[in-house]
């Protein structure tokens, strides 16, 4: 006879990890950016579910702290926020056509347009390609009445400010005769460190979440990480010399070694490239060893510890920027990979 499942069974399950989003940090980062912008508007970029932090929660925190608009990648994303924010300025940064344009018009969204086909009856921001080499117009047409803003996208504000300034100069040459329209160029990196990019508004994403656009310590720019991720040791065992752990035997013990198994893996957004990175177990640094699996990874322990010992993956001095440097990627990618569905993790939202 099979046991009977009831709705209460879910409530009794033990979560494999816990992700905490500190909206207080988002609010403080918003105010830090506003100070840097020195009078320019801040538009909060909350695409990809707020870089994995929760688009609705982050948008509410940013708007409540002085941001004047939110930006999404698609009309579908923007419509989800429109239900929560019926009167706020919402801008779709990615391309839209056909039915999406009609939906945007009905919902009062604003669209970024990067072609000569400018839709009617919807507020539009024309995008110039000044060096990114992706979406964008080569030349600015005479803006029709629907156009409310002009923009470009900086390719190297985080790595090559010289080229970024060349893009800004090109943009200003093209748009100075239309200075009555809202002009916006700056992303997080430019807003923080290239004053001439700020113009009328800045579209800031990664810095809102307290992550560095430069791959450095976010504290250097007065930013505070909002995401914290914690799990626990699910099992602890002693590996003798010659014994291994994980797929491919990528870790083979050279001496008697205590290892801990953490029930988090690439299915949760902890990618295989993070083998070798550092987490904290019982407050002490511990190296991730062997192959990261879909649902677990192993850590090397200095001593035997009991199952249930806390494991900090992000937070308490460990940042996504640290993990990103180890993996040879950027914190944006790691943040948007983190899985926050209830079946994989418990998500808490706090406001410190």
Image (spheres, rainbow, N blue to C red):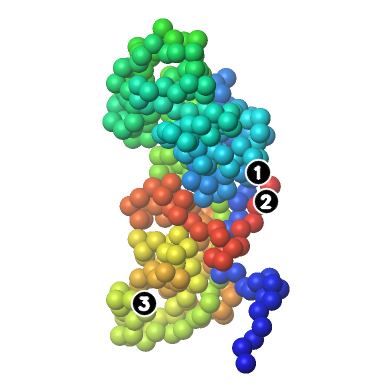
For disc 2, the marked residue is 350
Q: Nearer the viewer, residue 68 or 30?
A: 68
- Circle 1 — which element? helix
- The image position of residue 188, as x and y in percent, is 46, 33
Vertical side of 233 occupied by 194: above or below: above
For disc 3, the marked residue is 246
Give the mark nearer the N terminus: 3 vs 1.
Answer: 1
Residue 270: quarter of image: bottom left
Binning the other alpha carbons within 10 Å of mark 2 as few (below 14), some (14 to 19) or many (20 upward) gives few
Task: Identify the residue shown where x is 64% and y is 40%.
Answer: 83
Residue 60: quarter of image: top right
- The image position of residue 61, as x and y in percent, is 64, 39
Q: Quadrant of the N terminus?
A: bottom right
Residue lying at the far bottom of the rendered structure:
1
- Whole-angstrom CA distance, mark 2 to mark 1, is 7 Å
- The image position of residue 216, as x and y in percent, is 42, 43
Task: Identify the residue shown where x is 56% and y is 79%.
Answer: 307
In the picture, measured across the screen, residue 42 lies left or right of residue 288, that is right
- The image position of residue 220, as x and y in percent, is 48, 38
Task: Identify the residue shown where x is 36% and y is 77%.
Answer: 246
Q: Nearer the viewer, residue 237 or 171?
A: 171
Binning the other alpha carbons within 10 Å of mark 1 as few (below 14), some (14 to 19) or many (20 upward) gives some
Vertical side of 115 occupied by 339: above or below: below
Task: Identify the residue shown where x is 48% and y is 21%.
Answer: 120
For disc 1, the marked residue is 24
- Whole-angstrom CA distance, mark 3 to mark 2, is 36 Å
- Circle 3 — which element? loop
């Amino acid at each position: 006879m099979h046991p009977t499942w009831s709705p209460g069974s879910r409530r009794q399950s033990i979560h494999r990890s816990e992700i905490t989003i500190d909206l207080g940090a988002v609010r403080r980062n918003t105010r830090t950016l506003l100070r840097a912008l020195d009078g320019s508007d801040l538009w909060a970029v909350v695409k990809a579910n707020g870089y994995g932090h929760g688009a609705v929660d982050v948008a509410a925190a940013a708007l409540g702290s002085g941001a004047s608009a939110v930006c999404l990648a698609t009309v579908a994303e923007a419509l989800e926020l429109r239900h929560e924010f019926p009167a706020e300025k919402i801008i779709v940064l990615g391309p839209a056509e056909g039915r999406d344009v009609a939906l945007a018009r009905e919902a009062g969204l604003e669209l970024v347009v990067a072609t000569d086909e400018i839709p009617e009856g919807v507020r539009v921001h024309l995008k110039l390609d000044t060096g990114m080499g992706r979406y964008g117009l080569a030349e600015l047409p005479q803006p029709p009445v629907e156009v409310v803003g002009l923009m470009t996208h900086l390719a190297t504000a985080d790595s090559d400010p010289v080229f970024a300034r060349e893009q800004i100069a090109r943009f200003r040459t093209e748009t100075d005769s239309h200075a009555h329209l809202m002009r916006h160029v700056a992303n997080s990196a430019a807003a923080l460190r290239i004053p001439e990019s700020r113009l009328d508004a800045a579209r800031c994403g990664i810095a809102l979440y307290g992550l560095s656009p430069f791959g450095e310590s976010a504290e250097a720019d007065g930013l505070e990480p909002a995401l914290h991720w914690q799990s626990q040791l699910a099992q602890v065992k002693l590996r003798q010399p010659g014994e291994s752990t994980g797929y491919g035997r990528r870790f083979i013990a050279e001496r008697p070694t205590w290892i801990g198994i953490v029930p988090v893996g690439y299915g949760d957004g902890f990618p295989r490239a993070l083998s070798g990175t550092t987490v904290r177990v019982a407050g002490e640094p511990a190296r991730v060893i062997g192959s990261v699996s879909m649902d677990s990874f192993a850590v090397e322990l200095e001593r035997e510890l009991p199952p249930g010992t806390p494991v900090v993956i992000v937070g308490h001095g460990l940042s996504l920027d640290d993990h990103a440097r180890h993996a040879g990627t950027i914190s944006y990618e790691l943040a948007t990979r983190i899985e926050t569905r209830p079946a994989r993790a418990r998500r808490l939202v706090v406001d410190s």
